[in-house]
Amino acid sequence: MTGDSTVTSPFEPAGIRLGVVRGISYGLFGPPGEFVPQARALGAGLIRVYLFWSQAEPEPGRYDWGTVDRLLAQLDGSEEVWLTVCSSSPWATRQATDFLPPSPAHDQDAYGEFVRRLVGHCGGRVRYWQCDNEPSNTGLLWAGTAAEYVTQLATFHRAVKDADPAAAVVLGGCGFDVLSSEPGSEPRRFFSHLAEHGRDFFDLFSVHLYGDLASVPGYLDGARQIMRAHGYVKPLLAGELAGPQPFEFPAAMAVVQQAFAAAFAGAAAPGQSPVDLSTGELAGRVSQDTPEHRAMDSLYARMAELPPELAMFLDGCPDDLEARRQRIQCRQIVQRTILALAAGVRRTAYWNLAPEAPGPADHRQMMSLLIGKLPLMDYAGRELTVRHPAAGTFALLSRQLAGATAVTRRELADHPSVRAFEVTRDNRGPLLVLWDQRDTFHGEDKPPAEVRWPWPAPAATLTDALGETWPVKAEDGALPLRVGATPLFAELVSPR
């Protein structure tokens, strides 16, 4: 190996677009409803959607395009579409299921024909095609080996390019399990195999930016290192990003682990039987007294005694905790996105837009604890119309970054904890984004840092990530700024 073969890729996205992930399914747990106009109204220029093989080819050779057509009918051409295609099938794959986990196809020719027909049916309206998701999460998101994934990726790549040569193929997402693990760990070895043996079968490398906020730049560098170890680097996309989540707080996770260890004591060990998250199996579990339900019940029974960093993730937590969690979520939408863009990522997709389907959620599921409060929107009846505070922040960030072509980190020698970024925007004035990097939960309680920033105008308009706006005058060619945990946007005052 003589070094990186980093070259300008014909599939490298132009400009900057913020996007959203619809969820882990669309039209699987209910009728495929309208959601693209709602996402577009928030400023999303990228829409990521999951489709399962079981939905499009429920029986050998019989295709049902109802869900796909419902998606395509919502597009107006202004958005980019990213379709994650999961190889889950009751008849065509090693593990028979209509939902999770995807697994290797019995017949690669049949799989390739399915993908070819799907891509052809979309007629060039889908820009990014992804082969499954987070394959290193074996057992749940991929029931196969790394070598088997590469075999299926090669089939997927060939089928996509046959049907739409201009489309880009995205490698299955490199998740938090990989990015947060040490070199030599099993998740790292898994993705190293993909990077080495699958390098000719994808155009773009997707990363998922969860976990410790300060680690985001390191996660992106780690993703590039996985490819660089095999002599090349391809463009990165942030296929998922969001926070907060319980595993950002050690005190919270210690309690969760204790609760689940107690509930699972004596239960069958994970791995003794294959995971089955088919829609039928999930429906059957709702009323069962499972170890998962017992663990979650124990947390709810002790809500008042739990660390606040954990209690805020439970449904029905005290109002002050819920409001604090919402503020953290709003801050992290800005922070994770800006950190990714400053590291050279041009496409981001927030996880996620809304719950999988209308109706009450099952708060007794572990996934409800981990991601149940991340959606930007919710249903009123069967209509996706409710905006959470995070939706307002996403829309604000989308407006601020409209026309953005580059985000550049700037260091402040006098304030090493302050994160400052200059945003270059086409046909718009410069934008400055700042925040003070602090403890995620308690940081908002500290007084702000006093910062002076050189400014080429007599005044600026400040807007924080929570939507509050106010003017500030420059003093001796600099803006006096009070920078706290909540990101600030500073713009030139528009001439009247």
Image (cartoon, rainbow, N blue to C red):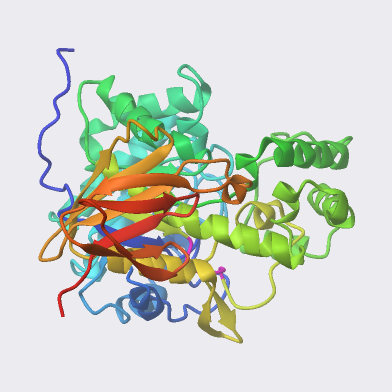
Q: Is residue 467 above or below residue 384?
A: above
Quarter of the image with the N terminus in it: top left
Residue pushed farthest front?
476
Question: Which residue is depicted at the point 79% across and 40% down?
Answer: 255
Residue pushed farthest top?
1
Say left or right for 15 vs 215.
left
Q: Quadrant of residue 22?
A: bottom left
Q: Nearer the viewer, residue 210 or 235?
A: 210
Residue 464: x and y, percent?
42, 62
Q: Nearer the viewer, residue 251 or 110?
A: 251
Say left or right for 201 vs 94.
left
Question: Which residue is depicted at the point 82% across and 36% down?
Answer: 258
Residue 351: x and y, percent?
47, 57
Residue 178: x and y, percent?
47, 31
Question: Which residue is depicted at the point 19% across and 69% down?
Answer: 123
Question: Which residue is depicted at the point 71% across and 39% down?
Answer: 253
Q: Is residue 90 visible from the viewing direction of this image? A: no
Q: Which residues are magenta?
A: 352-356
Of helix, strand and loop, which mostly describes the magenta segment? loop
Quarter of the image with the C terminus in it: bottom left
- The number of discs equals 0
Q: Tell me if residue 396 is in the magenta stretch.
A: no
